[in-house]
Amino acid sequence: MLVFPFADDNVQGGHFPLITYIFLVVNVLIFFFETQLSEPALAAFMHNFGVVPAEVTEGHDLLTLFTNMFLHGGWMHLIGNMLFLWIFADNIEALVGSTRFFIFYIIGGLLATFGHIWFNWDSTIPAVGASGAIAAVMGAYIVLFPQSRIKMLFLIFPFTVSAFVFLGFWIFSQVSSGIADLGVTTADTAGVAWWAHIGGFVFGVGVGFYWRAAGALRGVFLGDKKFTA
């Protein structure tokens, strides 16, 4: 990947992002556990704890609706998700507090998983990853901090773009890819659960507007800028 984000403007003060850091550590530890498994054992682990739409729609293995969001299918999958969690989640948790953030993250992950299941009803392939829950975080972020500066690298050259531009392009690419897959292939055969991302993001946008209307931003500093409403 030649262009990628590495930082953003941070909320000054606010709640310590404890849950964000816990999620980061838990995801990394579980992935390291995965790396210790043999190939057959890893396949069984993914099937047992990843979400298999065809089984969930029959009322089986419902716990996997939760467990799937803490598993990852490879180093790049883990690194990409944890990078986005690191950049975007701390501001949301700093703004709303650890308890509300925890509930928001889990519900976002669940709704994202349902989005994947809806478009892959009969799939027998396990889906894993934190990206649906993280997409919810990104949805809330674009509403709450659209002018936040996202720090990017192109090879070794740094530059910045607004969160609105970065996240707007990101969700556009997800929707375009999800629509392109309809009737052609499935998200899991393509390797990316596009509709989980879209579902999580839409949920996050809705919650972001609620928090904004409730005055969550009042008096908050983002970098050196203060919100007044």
Image (cartoon, rainbow, N blue to C red):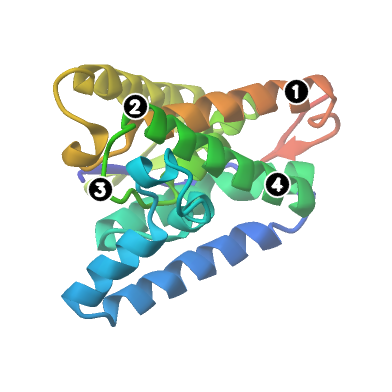
**142 on left or right of 125:** right
Of the two numbered discs 3 and 1 on the same chain, state the one appearing first in sequence: 3
Q: CA distance from mark 3 to mark 2?
A: 13 Å
Query: In which quadrant of the rendered view does residue 157 lie?
Result: top left
Q: Residue at x 19, y 74 (%)?
A: 40
Query: What residue occupies the far left of the structure in this picture?
Result: 184
Residue 193 appears anywhere in the view = yes
- Any mark on residue 125, and which? 3
* Residue under pointer 4: 103
- Crowd band around label 2 with a 10 angstrom C-alpha radius: few (<14), some (14–19), many (20+): some
Q: Residue at x 33, y 48 (%)?
A: 127
Q: Nearer the viewer, residue 52 or 80?
A: 52
* Residue under pointer 2: 119
- Crowd band around label 3 with a 10 angstrom C-alpha radius: few (<14), some (14–19), many (20+): some
Q: Residue at x 37, y 23 (%)?
A: 169
Tell me the amino acid under the disc marked 3: Ile
- Any mark on residue 210, and which? 1
**Disc nearest the viewer among 4 and 1:** 4
